Amino acid sequence: MDHFTYGMLTPLVGYIASFIGCLTGLSATSRARAATSAGAKSAWLLVGAVAIGGTGVWVMHFIAMLGFSVEGMPINYDVPLTIASALLAMAVVAAGLFLVGFLGDKLLYLLIGGLFVGLGVASMHYLGMAAMEMSGEIHYDPVLVGVSLVIAVVAGTAALWLCVHVKGWLLASVAALVMAAAVAGMHYTGMAAMHMSGAAGTPPGGTSALELLGPLIAGIFLTTVAMVFVVLMWPTEDEMRERQAFEERVAGTTSR
């Protein structure tokens, strides 16, 4: 097995994609904090979930998978399971963001949300691994699997806390760098837990990585690029709060 078929290209590109997704998600959740209606807050939280869960987590995972190979053993992917893993990543992140976004960052909510997000992200990883169609059989080291779960839960809890508290581009950028590192750490720990057995041969079914993953990764990443432009054009959290304060002052003056 080779996790770095193209050297550091796939880990680096995956990390950059994860950073962009996490930074976009943090920027979206900061707007959610300043939103005055449940509808607007929900919309920004959904943007954050797609950015973090879709690009920050899932795209990073499968870009890294493009660098995984087994000598003499072609690898295909089960289409429904691969798509399900993407939807799962975005769904669990959305659930965690909505929990702390509407109920606050009390320790209990953070722990529940972090556990749910972490285990969900880990499930996405192993579901993505299960989507691989190969002639060999996959086995996992239970100790390293356990370590990957711990990393995922800790990272998920920290991510929710950051989504509630981080303000400003500088702090958000630093937080996104840390979040992307945690996502990569969980992924490669889970990959290190994997072992192969069986003879090389043609996979029983599925679609090749480039035919399936290329369009999916490109689609989610282009969606994230569109969200980046929306976030950049929208007022920042502080600007939104200043506008709200101004409108309240104007309304108060008018009512006198």
Image (spheres, rainbow, N blue to C red):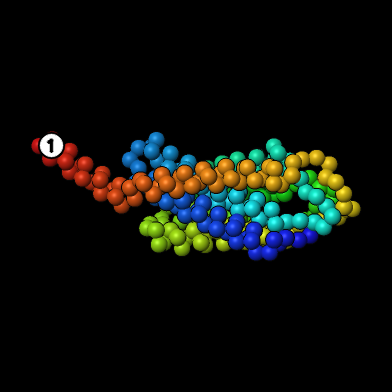
Quarter of the image that includes the N terminus: bottom right
- Residue 203: % across, % down: 83, 45
In this view, the residue farthest toward the left is: 256
Would residue 38 appear left or right of 81 to someone viewing this image? left
Left or right, 161 with respect to 135, comes to: left
Q: Which residue appears at 42% of the width and 42% of the height? A: 44
Viewer-closest of 30 and 158: 30
Name the residue furthest right.
199
Q: Position of residue 243 (x, y in %)?
A: 25, 45
Q: In the picture provided, is 249 more to the left or to the right than 145?
A: left
Nearest to the observer: residue 116 or residue 163 = 163
Given residues 144 and 73, the one toward you in this image is 73
**Residue 178 in the image, given as x and y percentages of width and height:** 52, 62
Q: Which residue is mark 1?
A: 254
Asked if one can make out residue 115 in the rendered structure from this viewpoint, the answer is no
Amino acid carrying label 1: it is Thr
* Location of residue 150 by image quarter: bottom right
Residue appearing at x 83%, y 52% in the figure:
73
Q: How many marks?
A: 1
Q: Residue 152: give x, y in percent of width and height.
A: 60, 56
Q: Secondary structure at mark 1?
A: helix
Query: What residue sits 60% from the left and 56% below the top?
Result: 14
The answer to whether any part of residue 135 appears in the image is: yes
Few, some or many residues within 10 Å of mark 1 (<14, 14–19, 20+): few
Does residue 44 appear left or right of residue 130 in this picture?
left
